[in-house]
Image (cartoon, rainbow, N blue to C red):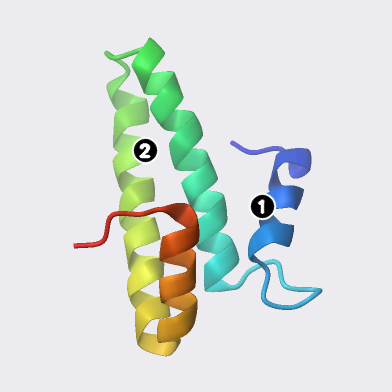
Amino acid sequence: MLSKRQKEPVIKEYQVHKTDTGSAEVQVGLITKRIKELALHLKKHPKDNHSRRGLLMMVGKRRKFLEYLRGENEKAYDKIVKKLKLEVA
């Protein structure tokens, strides 16, 4: 889980306008940050299957947000995929 202090820079980096805290771009950024942290945890604790399930659920949630963003705003989708250096199939 991300603390408020950890979320602030991510929100500022991906927000669409000054008061934006919940757009698809911000959500993808926050989920990606959580995925990276959980991946580090799983490298240290490879048998933690409960966390692995949570990681897979987060990856699915991020994928759904990206699909939504692709349908709504192709430019924003391309921008965030490049910024996060995501592999898109």
Q: Helix, strand, or loop for circle 2?
A: helix
For this rendering, which residue is in front, 39 or 53? Answer: 39
- First in residue order: circle 2 vs circle 1: 1
Residue for badge 1: 10
Nearer the observer, disc 2 or disc 1? 1
Looking at the image, the residue that sits furthest to the left is: 89
- Please report the residue visible at 67 percent of the width from the left and 76 percent of the height from the top: 16
Q: Estimate how packed mark 1 is, as few (under 14), some (14 to 19) or many (20 or more) residues with alpha carbons within 10 Å.
A: some
**Looking at numbered disc 1 in the image, what kind of residue is underneath it?**
Val
**Residue under label 2:** 54
Q: Residue at x 35, y 86 (%)?
A: 71
- Circle 2: is it few (<14), some (14-19), or many (20+) Cα within 10 Å? few
Picture residue at 51% right of the left edge, 40% below the top: 34
Question: Please, which residue is most extreme toward the bottom here?
Answer: 72
Q: Amino acid at mark 2?
A: Gly
Q: Residue at x 54, y 56 (%)?
A: 29
Image-based side of 27 in relation to 36, left or right: right
